Amino acid sequence: MPQAVISGTGLYQPPHIITNAELVEAFNAYAQAHNATHADAIARGEQVALTSSSVEFIEKASGIKQRYVIEKAGVLDPARMRPKFEERADDQLSLMAEIGVDACRKALAAAGRTGADVDAIFCAASNMQRAYPAMAVEIQQALGAGGYGFDMNVACSSATFAIEQAVNAVRAGGVKCALVVNPEITSAHIEWKDRDCHFIFGDVCTALVIESADSAVSADQWEVLGTKLATQFSNAIRNNFGFINRSEDSDPLARDKTFRQEGRKVFKEVVPMAAAHIEAHLAAMHLEPTQVRRFWLHQANLGMNQLILKKLVGAEAGGDLAPLVLDTYANTSSAGSVLAFHEHHADMKPGDLGVICSFGAGYSIGSVVLRKA
Ligand SMILES: CC(C)(COP(=O)(O)OP(=O)(O)OC[C@H]1O[C@@H](n2cnc3c(N)ncnc32)[C@H](O)[C@@H]1OP(=O)(O)O)[C@@H](O)C(=O)NCCC(=O)NCCS
């Protein structure tokens, strides 16, 4: 069976930064205007007044200091509170495909490959811009790739679940060179009017080249020693947006048509699940967590990652063992753990072990054990 390696990574970084201060200022202006408009109903007890957000809370509760977004003005407009994108014609590249192509081109260049070398594309993200044709097929055409492509969604675990598909395709021999691409336009699925979650997400797109070790030419290769995926149903993270909505005559802007979560519940339930998952995956490969040089964990919450690390190796997360990117990028959904890998692997030595691990809605957890070749 051919060995699969990760041979290149790429990142699309959006052009705009929103700091916590800017975010809180916009939210508080929105809340103030909302409360003024609904003052009578609030006074009669028919509506609850919105309370203000704060920079201190956001940084302390999450570790997030800023986020990147594709469009900023609409998000920070208290009269709008969502990005403003132009609808594109059918013959134009879609927004998801556009940022996907950018990240893929960078990953291919890092791997010493071109689009013509690619024979499978897995476009994996927590939201899809349309039902079909698949964004993966659009990206395939734009890159001049062959083979096949499809879209897949496993929420925040989309990337690790796609890595397993790509690795299996390479190992089975039918695919020589695959792309896993994670265009996460989270700014369009988050409810910027809800102070409980308005600070959580940011936009990016990551891409990975996964190919057969026999023919890989990159100077920076990572053997995929194993992958392990798991799901367990939970309603604690949910988004009801979907194609049935119009037949239900439901309001497309209703709160349940964007990201919702019971943050504290998620925190408490997912931390032990993720730690046990990684431990079991490593144990099945006769490895101890202390043998792992670096953990590239899902980037949802600083405290979550610290607790997972504590359970695994009894150490604080951050810095060298489990680098954080969420302070700069916020939660970029499925792209987060790949982004941590992209930014923090250059210093590692041949033979070093690492684990990419994502966790999120479903619940879903995916881990990928790597060794620097
Ligand atoms: C979302 C998260 C950061 C919230 O942190 P938390 O410590 O759990 O905070 P809580 O939601 O319990 O809120 C604590 C208090 O702060 C308040 N609060 C919430 N948002 C606030 C804000 N933006 N500004 C100020 N106060 C805020 C709450 O209303 C609550 O007030 P109360 O104690 O009077 O009821 C945290 O739960 C988390 O990261 N969970 C992990 C899940 C996750 O991020 N998943 C994403 C998908 S993988």
Image: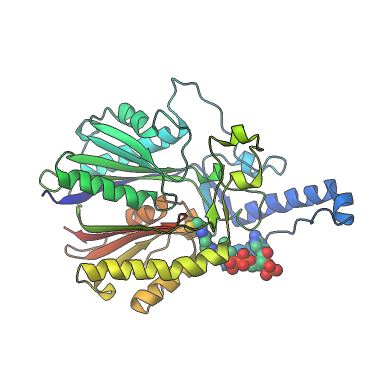
Q: Is residue 63 visible to us here?
A: no
Quadrant where the C terminus is found in the figure: bottom left
- Residue 328 point in image, percent of width and height: 48, 56
Q: Residue at 19%, 71% (x, y): give it.
A: 286
Q: Residue at 42%, 27% (x, y): give it.
A: 93
> Is 235 left, or right, of 5 in this rendering?
right
Most foreground residue, 12 or 370: 370
- Residue 251 point in image, percent of width and height: 67, 38
Q: Residue at 78%, 48% (x, y): give it.
A: 34
Count of picture labels: 0
> Is 204 left, or right, of 69 in this rendering?
left
Most foreground residue, 319 or 173: 173
17 shown above or below 280: above
- Residue 189 point in image, percent of width and height: 55, 44
- Residue 342 point in image, percent of width and height: 33, 53
Colouring style: rainbow
Location of ligand 1 given as a quarter of the image: bottom right
124 shown above or below 284: above
Q: Is residue 198 visible to us here?
A: yes
Q: Residue furthest front?
A: 248
Q: Classify residue 147 by image quadrant.
A: top left
167 shown above or below 120: below
